[in-house]
Amino acid sequence: MDAAANSPAAAPEQGSSLWHDAWLRLRKNRLAVAGLAFLVFVAVTCLLGPLFSPYGYEEQRLDLGASPPGAKHWLGTDTLGRDLLVRTLTGGRVSLGVGLAATFVALTIGVVYGAVAGFVGGKRDAFMMRVVDIMYSLPFPIFVILLMVFFGRNIILLFVAIGAVEWLTMARIVRSQVMAVKRMEFIEAARSLGYGRRRIIFRHILPNILGPVIVYTTLTIPAVMLLEAFLSFLGLGVQPPMSSWGVLIKDGAEKMEEFSWLLVFPAALFSLTLLSLNFVGDGLRDALDVRSSKD
């Protein structure tokens, strides 16, 4: 009996978690891995690059003017003689910061609102979703523009305003996931043990819907960055002398025929960053799909 118990056949089978399987599947997705590597490279370069540059993003050399890419200025200079590489990296800090901060605001509002609506159900859920439907019907770019006009062009307000626009879809996704999870047996067991609503929502339901939330978060960041670029293109985003990718694209578009590099380099970096974010989001969606997990 002891020999049988100690035999390899009697050894307990090692299982694997959903997150471990998801990581293994994500690593096999070459586009997602390449996108993640590019995003890390861009983030580190934008964060540290300007610190090692001999040029400041505000430093003007009017005698130099708009110069094409060369040995001293790798991406050229703008019409005020400012180094385009430094301004692009500094603008990347702002654009990525807006994307992350506004997405965090949208994530916080959307997750809490959707979780409460899905869990309480009934008339309160119906009322909360009608509020979301009404807000969906509003022209939110105009709403954000009005906020910027009435309260001033403040970068912190920009974070909050964009985040307050982007939370609606997150709320709907979380609500549908919560409504599915709350009918499961382990939630009924938690109720029978006398756990309160807050504990059930935040300790038992939300950890089990992280997959869709993470996926949609990665897809919200590029949407937020596009909205910031749109506002900056209208002159309502980041204000000079600070730059963002949207500001640089706006300035480059105005001088595209004479100085094409002012548009090409910021637009290319912005497009590649958005493409990488979408690759990562698609990869996470496929990796966290339980239908792809091993039986």
Image (tube, rainbow, N blue to C red):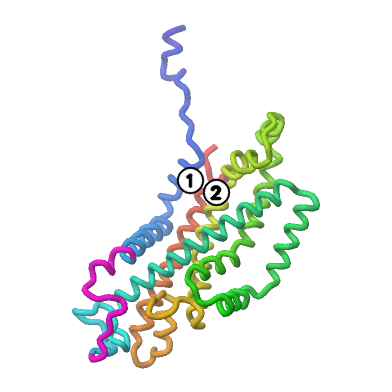
Residue, disc 1: 22
Residue, disc 2: 211
Question: Which numbered disc flags the more N-terminal residue, 1 or 2?
Answer: 1
* Residue 47 at x, y percent in the picture: 33, 64
* Residue 233 at x, y percent in the picture: 48, 81
Tell me the element at label 1: helix
* Residue 114 at x, y percent in the picture: 66, 53
Residue that protrudes farthest toward the front in the picture: 151
Is disc 1 in contact with disc 2, using a CB cutoff of under 8 Å? yes
* Residue 56 at x, y percent in the picture: 27, 75
The vertical placement of 52 against 30, above or below, is below
Residue that protrudes farthest toward the top in the picture: 1
Q: Amino acid at mark 2?
A: Gly
Q: Is residue 62 magenta?
A: yes
The vertical placement of 108 against 17, above or below, is below
By secondary structure, the bulk of the magenta-drawn segment is best described as: loop
Q: Amino acid at mark 1?
A: Ala
Camera-nearest residue between 32 and 199: 199
Magenta residues?
47-63
**Residue depicted at x 27% and y 80%:** 59
The vertical placement of 284 against 102, above or below, is above
